[in-house]
Image: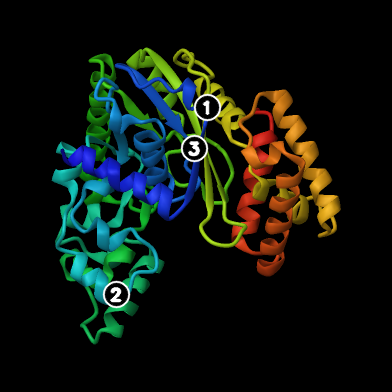
Amino acid sequence: LLYELVGVGMTAYARLVHRTVVLGVDRLRLEPGVVLVSTHLSDADVPVLGGALYGGARLWGDPTLTRPSFAVGNDLLLPGYLAGYPRGLPLALRRALWPLGIGPVMRRWVRCLPVRHADRLRLVEALRSLPELDLAEALPPARVEELRRRATRFGEPTPRVARDVLDGRYADLLWQDLTRAELDGPALAGLWENRLRASALDLRQLIRHVRGGGALILFPHGRLSPDGAIGPLDPRPARLLHLARPTAVQPVAIAHDPFERGRPRAFVGIGEARCAPSRRGGARELLTALRQTMPLACGLAVAHSLAEVNLPARTATLTEAVERATELARSNGRPIEPALEDDITRRARVEEAVRAVRGLGVAHPSVKRAARTYATMLEPVK
């Protein structure tokens, strides 16, 4: 029941917070052993995709369709995730959320399967496992200084060991990623050995899940794209798919278009199902499939034309550019925003996007991200 309720919640999010449109839903295969691989360009991707599947693909109305599990970063399942990960939260709210843990619910009822990276982790994971760890000896100086400044802000003594900062007031700092190169030393050798074993166990669990007939949603970027680019991918998902022998691998790409009045648009493209990637070159195969599946959205093309091609911000000029982009997408079999298929609605969408980009400026991060997404969806994979 909770799985179904979460699906309803994601559907509401996809429709009320975003204007979500599913393209190619007739190709979707929700069956035993299928793996959906999705782009990860926005924090909104999980609820948008979940809502697209549950609402747009009518998962809610058909109990015969296989309910997929989610492969998620293991930090989602850690106590304090709601305090640590979301950006922009007030520290008072972080302190209130710090004791909460959604891991047991997400594991059992929402069917989330953890994925741990062997070569990086959240700082909180290291400090919780080693509460007496000397911060100055183990952490990079910049990280130690951040923790000390936060302590000073709250009038606390200078933190010395790990347990001194295991508090909600430090949650956003504790949820930063650290690599093995940043956390290296004799006191941490056992930590990384355990991490390697745990990562291998996670991989085996995912393989057993798919081989046993479970459906799975996988984000092969490994982490949120930092600049909006589609790729590069973490090489591990391709190896996982080769070993898991899924019945089909189906690419899903989500185009986010915020350049308009009101709710941002999200276009979820469903690509053609295919066989598992080959042992060698599998990551390239996945990346090619994701780039080919990324929908053409008006805002992406307009942002690229203004920020990268430096076209003048004239509606007529940009309408012609978007028309050419639509013809190219059609010839390549790429999903297309429905409004771009008609001359009148295309011009209206271009006017709306130009107005929004002008208001933000071409150097705005969201404009640059959209332009980068458009550029990489056309780039051949090397």
Q: Which residue, as the protein is rendered here, is positioned at the far bottom?
A: 155
**How far across and down, in percent of the image, does residue 113 sit?**
25, 34
Element class at badge 2: helix
**How far across and down, in percent of the image, does residue 213 sit?**
25, 16
Question: How many angstroms separate mark 2 from mark 3 (CA)?
Answer: 31 Å
Q: Which residue is mark 1?
A: 24
Q: Label 1 neighbourhood size at 10 Å, few (<14), some (14-19), many (20+)?
A: some
Q: Residue at x 37, y 41 (%)?
A: 51
Element class at badge 3: loop
Q: Which residue is mark 2?
A: 91
Q: Which residue is mark 3?
A: 39
Amino acid, disc 3: Thr
Position of the N terminus, as image quadrant, is top left
Q: Please say which color scheme the image uses.
A: rainbow
**How far across and down, in percent of the image, does residue 262 sit?**
54, 61
Residue 333 appears left or right of 183: right
Amino acid, disc 1: Gly
Element class at badge 1: loop
> Which residue is at the front of the view, 332 or 137?
332
Q: Are marks 1 and 3 in contact (CB under 8 Å)?
A: no
Residue 45 location, quadrant: top left
Amino acid, disc 2: Leu
Question: How many angstroms separate mark 1 from mark 3 (CA)?
Answer: 16 Å
Q: Label 3 neighbourhood size at 10 Å, few (<14), some (14-19), many (20+)?
A: many
Q: Residue at x 71, y 63 (%)?
A: 355
Q: Earlier in the sequence, mark 1 or mark 3?
A: 1
Q: Can I make out residue 68 in this image?
A: no
Q: Can I make out residue 377 in this image?
A: yes
Say above or below: 332 vs 141: above
Q: Residue at x 25, y 56 (%)?
A: 81
